[in-house]
């Protein structure tokens, strides 16, 4: 049976290459552009060997029963990460379908979900689950650890799910900051996944930034394969019920309720967020389009004085940047309080590095 020192050494030897790999994956996810997929795969290529040896050492060692849970979870994270690296490399090398790249990266959410429960136990893991500008904040890291270990009868915090297994539709996932004091009202970010996506996965596009800035994140899952962009709207009423369900359990700052989304989620954020009576005070669509239904007379009336943070990439191969420029012009003419971010090196990918700016804008 290894000594506690040997156990700590084995963990440390795995965590360093593991977290380095995950940080590279964040970078690849942000700069994903199908024509350069092979070059992106080269950034990840050294990580397979870097992870394999410490993972093998962890598999071969017999650990004390009181740390067996941590060992099994670390093994699971390591194996999933290697599978993700192999899937992305295969898609970049051999597939002509750009969606295979996105399918490979979808595994990244599961890796993060498996790793996150270890954040209170391992300082490097906790710091990785913060955006880089906050990782040196020792006080914040300690507050997060203490909050995650609070008594069982305290209000529930962390990552929660409501009927939102990955084989189901129509539920939601929720992040409640561990640092919440049980009283203070928090801003609410409602984040809508893209087509064929899932809220349980998209939650992780926002968790690091929300964790650092004490914001609630509600990540719903559409009832169908994507949001109600055609025909009957089956998502709108349930989306608003989700918001009210969260607000009934946690104090929401009603002056800061943000509806954001990626791709189809962005398009639906426009469509639903600009409806009369919608509960959202701010909109932040990324890489979507202004729905044609909003181009008819008076459909943009609610945009007047509404804060909107519109993001689009110049390299977007699905929705050309001209669609965003059209939306910019129409929203400006309608009187929206518009921030327009046309990003030179962004393709059809979620710009996670915009999240801190969005949350600062929301706070202001």
Image: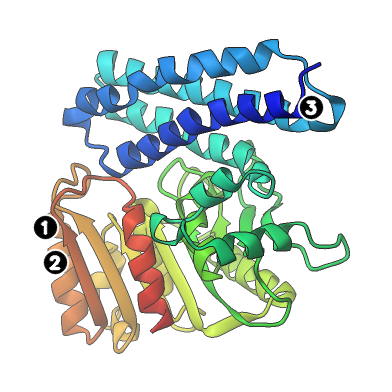
Residue position marked by numbered label 3 in the rendering: 68
Instruction: Identify which residue is drawn at 83% across, 24% down.
Output: 64
User: Within 10 Å of the Cα at label 1, are there few (<14), some (14-19), or many (20+) other Cα atoms?
Assistant: few
The circle on residue 362 is none
Reply above or below: 195 against 280: above
Asked if disc 1 and disc 2 are in contact, CB closer than 8 Å, the reply is: yes
Q: Quadrant of the C terminus?
A: bottom left
The circle on residue 322 is 1
| Structural distance between the alpha carbons of marks 1 and 3 | 54 Å
Tag in front: 1 or 3 = 3
Query: Which residue is identified by label 2?
Result: 326
Q: Pick the residue in front: 93 or 121.
A: 121
Report the side of 310 relative to 80 (left or right).
left
Residue 249: where, in percent of width, then height?
A: 74, 73
In three-dimensional space, the C-alpha distance between marks 1 and 2, rounded to whole angstroms, equals 6 Å
List x then y, in percent, for residue 235.
Answer: 54, 60
Can the viewer see residue 222 in this picture? no
Q: Are marks 2 and 3 in contact (CB under 8 Å)?
A: no
């Amino acid at each position: 049976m290894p000594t506690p020192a040997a156990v700590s050494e084995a963990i440390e030897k795995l965590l360093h290459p593991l977290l380095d790999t995950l940080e590279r994956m964040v970078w690849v996810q942000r700069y994903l552009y199908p024509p350069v997929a092979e070059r992106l795969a080269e950034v990840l290529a050294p990580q397979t060997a870097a992870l394999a040896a410490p993972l093998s050492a962890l598999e071969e060692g017999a650990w004390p029963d009181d740390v067996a849970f941590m060992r099994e979870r670390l093994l699971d994270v390591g194996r999933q990460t290697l599978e993700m690296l192999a899937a992305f490399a295969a898609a970049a090398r051999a597939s002509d379908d750009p969606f295979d790249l996105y399918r490979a990266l979808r595994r990244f959410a599961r890796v993060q979900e498996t790793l996150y429960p270890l954040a209170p136990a391992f300082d490097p893991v906790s710091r990785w689950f913060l955006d880089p500008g906050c990782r040196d904040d020792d006080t914040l890291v300690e507050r997060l650890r203490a909050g995650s270990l609070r008594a069982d009868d305290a209000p529930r915090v962390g990552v929660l799910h409501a009927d939102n297994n990955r084989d189901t539709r129509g539920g939601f996932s929720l992040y409640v900051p561990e640092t919440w004091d049980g009283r203070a009202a928090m801003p609410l970010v409602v984040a809508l996944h893209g087509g064929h996506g899932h809220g349980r996965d998209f939650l992780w596009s926002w968790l690091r930034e929300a964790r650092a800035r004490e914001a609630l994140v509600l990540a719903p899952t559409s009832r169908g394969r994507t949001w109600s962009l055609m025909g009957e709207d089956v998502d709108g009423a349930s989306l608003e019920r989700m918001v009210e369900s969260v607000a009934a359990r946690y104090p929401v700052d009603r002056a800061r309720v943000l509806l954001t989304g990626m791709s189809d989620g962005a398009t639906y954020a426009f469509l639903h967020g600009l409806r009369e009576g919608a509960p959202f005070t701010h909109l932040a669509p990324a890489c979507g389009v202004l729905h044609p239904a909003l181009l008819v007379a008076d459909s943009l009336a609610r945009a007047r004085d509404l804060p909107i943070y519109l993001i689009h990439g110049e390299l977007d191969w699905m929705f050309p940047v001209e669609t965003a420029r059209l939306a910019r012009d129409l929203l400006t003419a309608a009187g929206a309080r518009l921030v327009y971010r046309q990003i030179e090196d962004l393709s059809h990918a979620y710009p996670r590095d915009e999240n801190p700016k969005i949350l600062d804008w929301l706070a202001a």
